[in-house]
Each structure stands twice: as C-alpha cells, then as structure tokens.
Amino acid sequence: MTGDQLTTGEQSTTGEQPTTGEQPTPRKRSYEEKFAERLAKRQAGRKPLKEGKVFEHGPAKFVFMFVIGFVVLGHILVLIIMMLSGMH
C-alpha cells in the first residue's frame, strides 16, 4: 500500500474480504470431504455383518485366497530350489 491509501483508508485489491455486508461465498468442499460423505452414506445403507462370516464380498475372498496360495507356493518352490542347489 502507498501512503495515500493508508491515510484515506482505501482497501487494496489483494483478496481482502469485502466489508459491505455481503455474504462471503461458501468455500468449496475438498475431495476428501466429498468422498467421506459418500462413504458414510454407503455404509449407512448396508445391512449389519452376519456373525461368523468373514468375507461378505465374493471377489475379496477370491483375491485373498489367490494371494495366500501364491505366497505359499512361492515359499515351497524357493525351498525346493535351495535344497536342490545345496544351500542351507
């Protein structure tokens, strides 16, 4: 600001809020807030989990079993290779 602006009380145009009684514009909600709201609505609409059931979702069960099987087979194959090569 220049000295004239300080003595006359003029506002600069650097993004200050207007003081004329106008309502400030509502801020935009962030992506995280929108996502959390959609997730809360979706979870509220779901029925409660059944006792004793671990996987409510079929594809999740398939992926879990595939990953576990892959890890177990990988360990067995590495063990066999190490035994055949004479490593301890």
Image (cartoon, helix red, strand yellow):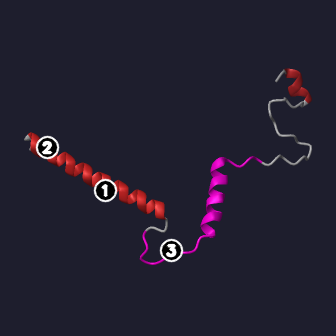
Q: Quadrant of the N terminus?
A: top right
Q: What residue type is labelled 3?
A: Leu
Residue under the image location 84 percent in, 21 percent down:
2
Which of the two discs, 2 and 1, labels the residue nearer the N terminus?
1
Residue under label 1, please give it: 69
Tag 2–tag 3 contact (CB < 8 Å): no
Q: Is residue 4 magenta?
A: no
Give the label on residue 19, or none: none
Q: In this view, does 34 lie to the left or right of 1?
A: left
- Name the residue nearer the viewer: 8 or 29: 29
Calculate the distance from the C-alpha at mark 2 to the C-alpha at mark 1. 20 Å
For the record, the magenta segment spans 27-54
Q: Which of marks 2 and 3 is nearer the N terminus?
A: 3
- Above or below, 39 against 49 in this view is above
| Dot 1 crowding, Cα within 10 Å, few <14, some 14–19, many 20+ | few
Label 2 Cα crowd, 10 Å radius (few <14 / some 14-19 / many 20+): few
Which amino acid type corresponds to the residue marked 1 in the rendered image?
Gly
Q: Which amino acid does label 2 sit on?
A: Met
Mark 2 vs mark 3, foreground winner is: 2
Residue located beneath label 2 in the image: 82
Residue that mark 3 sits on: 49
- Please tell me how crowded label 3 is: few (under 14), some (14-19), or many (20+) other residues with Cα within 10 Å: few
Distance Cα–Cα, label 3 vs label 1? 26 Å
- Going 10% across and 43% down the picture, which residue do you hit? 84
How far from the left and from the top, in percent, is residue 85? 10, 40
Residue closer to the observer: 70 or 3: 70
Which quarter of the rendering shows the C terminus?
Answer: top left
For the residues bearing labels 2 and 1, Cβ distance under 8 angstroms: no
Whichever of callouts 3 and 1 sits on the residue coming sooner in the sequence is 3
Marks 2/3: CA–CA distance? 45 Å
Looking at the image, which residue is at 25% across and 52% down? 73
Up-down relation of residue 43 to residue 83 (above or below) = below
